[in-house]
Image (cartoon, helix red, strand yellow):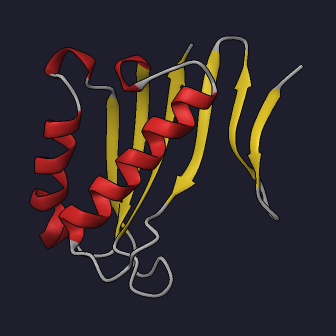
């Protein structure tokens, strides 16, 4: 049986199954922030979501990052590298997308283990 955390009207933010933790697409609340600021806010949320499931960022397995402007990727990468220790880097893909709604610049999806 899966364990689900943080229900929203359309999904659960976190789902655990067989020692894996799936965190749904996470965006920032303050869309006025630049790419670095939005990234920091999202990563702080992910820290909390992983904690809900008894995990943490050192247990990340994979990440998919959606950005609306690939020219801003270096700003995101700098914050990402501050957040994670080199030995804890997961597999990762960064995908350019046309729109994430409003002035959202970035959305992150991660999978970790417990």
Residue 9 location (% of width, % of height): 82, 65
Residue 11 placement: quadrant: bottom right
Using the image as rendered, state which of residue 98 and residue 34 is in the foreground: 34
Residue that protrudes farthest toward the right in the picture: 1
Residue 70 location (% of width, % of height): 20, 68
Residue 42 falls left or right of residue 85: right
Residue 113 location (% of width, % of height): 54, 16
Q: Identify which residue is drawn at 29% across, 57% down.
A: 39
Residue 32 placement: quadrant: bottom left
Residue that protrudes farthest toward the bottom in the picture: 102
Quadrant placement of the C terminus: top right
Residue 79 falls left or right of residue 48: left
Q: Identify which residue is drawn at 56% across, 38% down.
A: 49
Residue 79 falls left or right of residue 21: left
Residue 36 location (% of width, % of height): 19, 62
Q: Is residue 91 above or below residue 8?
A: above
Residue 34 falls left or right of residue 47: left
Q: Identify which residue is drawn at 58% across, 40% down.
A: 23
Quadrant placement of the N terminus: top right
Q: Is residue 62 above or below residue 103?
A: above
Q: How many marks?
A: 0
């Amino acid at each position: 049986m899966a364990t689900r955390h943080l229900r929203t009207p359309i999904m659960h933010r976190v789902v655990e199954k067989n020692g894996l933790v799936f965190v749904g697409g996470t965006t920032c609340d303050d869309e006025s922030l630049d790419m670095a600021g939005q990234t920091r806010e999202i990563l702080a949320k992910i820290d909390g979501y992983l904690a809900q499931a008894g995990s943490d960022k050192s247990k990340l397995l994979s990440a998919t990052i959606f950005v609306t402007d690939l020219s801003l990727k270096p700003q995101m990468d700098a914050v990402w590298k501050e957040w994670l220790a080199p030995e804890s880097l997961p597999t990762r893909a960064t995908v350019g997308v046309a729109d994430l709604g409003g002035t959202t610049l970035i959305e992150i999806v991660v999978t970790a283990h417990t």
